Image (spheres, rainbow, N blue to C red):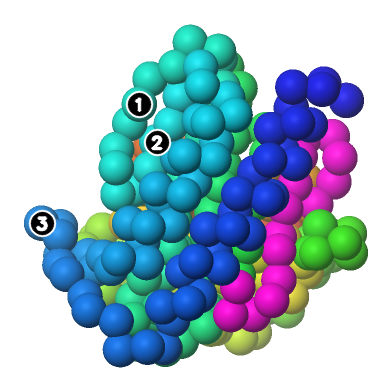
Amino acid sequence: MNPEWRSRYETAIEAAHQAGRFALQHFDRNIAVEWKADQTPVTLADRGAEELLRTNLLGKFARDGFLGEESGATPGDSGFRWIIDPVDGTRSFVRGVPLWATLVGLEYNRELIAGVAFAPALGNTYRALRGDGAFRDDRPIHVSKIAQLKDADIYYSSFIWFEKAGREKQFIRLLKQTQRQRGFGDFYGFALVAQGGGDLMVEHGVKPWDLGALVPIVQEAGGRISNWQGVLNIEAPDVLASNGVLHDDALRILNES
């Protein structure tokens, strides 16, 4: 295993835990909420957790790049870049719903190689390093073996995003092909797919920091993740994660006229 990858991966786990524990101190405490220009919420938990991550990661790896939801981009020249969402699921966070996580993703030469999703309110850490497998805490995880949509569980966050994308008819058609549909949005739907608790996670309106940590986790668990055109692109606003077997069938339905 590449020692530079391993050292950063271990640091990412420690940093995510520290930042997530900081955010947890403010969870379910009637925290003040501000609204950004894009009408997404932000709190002092988001900003404080990201500052901790920036300090810890760049303090140890000063030449690495950094992209954070709250503080933006800082270039680097090492070939590595950290992609951070300090509180993924802020809307859940501010309403006392425990389905939120601190996300730390790591790129090397523009390829995602490691990810950590620490869910403090649930007490779980999802993590993966390329070639090392995916884990929930210390337990290896793997995607399901469900082979037909009619037997599948599908997750998403909000129907309104599919209306905004002009794909509400296709989305409903896909839902009707599956056995069960759940609104487990943000990191949690992807984590459930990775651990085999569900089979598909479809989303629109995502940003790079929403996906940077989750791509390696899904991939190392044996799954597939792409945009709706079938290409992995964390800059795209649409994403589909699956157990791999169901991926092409779901893409076909999402792209029907």
Q: Which mark is residue 74?
A: 1
Residue identifier under label 3: 37
**Circle 1: element type:** strand
Q: Vertically, is 16 above or below 106?
A: below
Callout 1 touching callout 2 (CB < 8 Å): yes
Task: Pick the residue in front: 136 or 34.
Answer: 34
Residue identifier under label 2: 67
Task: Report crowding for label 3: few under 14, some 14 to 19, many 20 or more residues within 10 A (C-alpha).
Answer: few
Name which residue type carries label 1: Thr
From the top left corner, tell me how far across and down residue 172 is, in percent: 41, 76
Task: Pick the residue in front: 42 or 45.
Answer: 45
Residue shown at the point (15%, 67%) measured from the top left = 35
Residue shown at the point (50%, 66%) measured from the top left = 22
Q: Earlier in the sequence, mark 1 or mark 2?
A: 2
Name which residue type carries label 2: Leu
**Circle 3: element type:** loop
Measure the C-alpha gap from mark 3 to mark 2: 19 Å
Q: Is residue 138 left or right of residue 123?
A: right
Q: Is residue 106 left or right of residue 72?
A: right
Q: Vertically, is 172 above or below 194?
A: below
From the top left corner, tell me how far across and down residue 148 is, in percent: 73, 69
Measure the C-alpha gap from mark 1 to mark 3: 21 Å
Magenta highlight range = 120-134
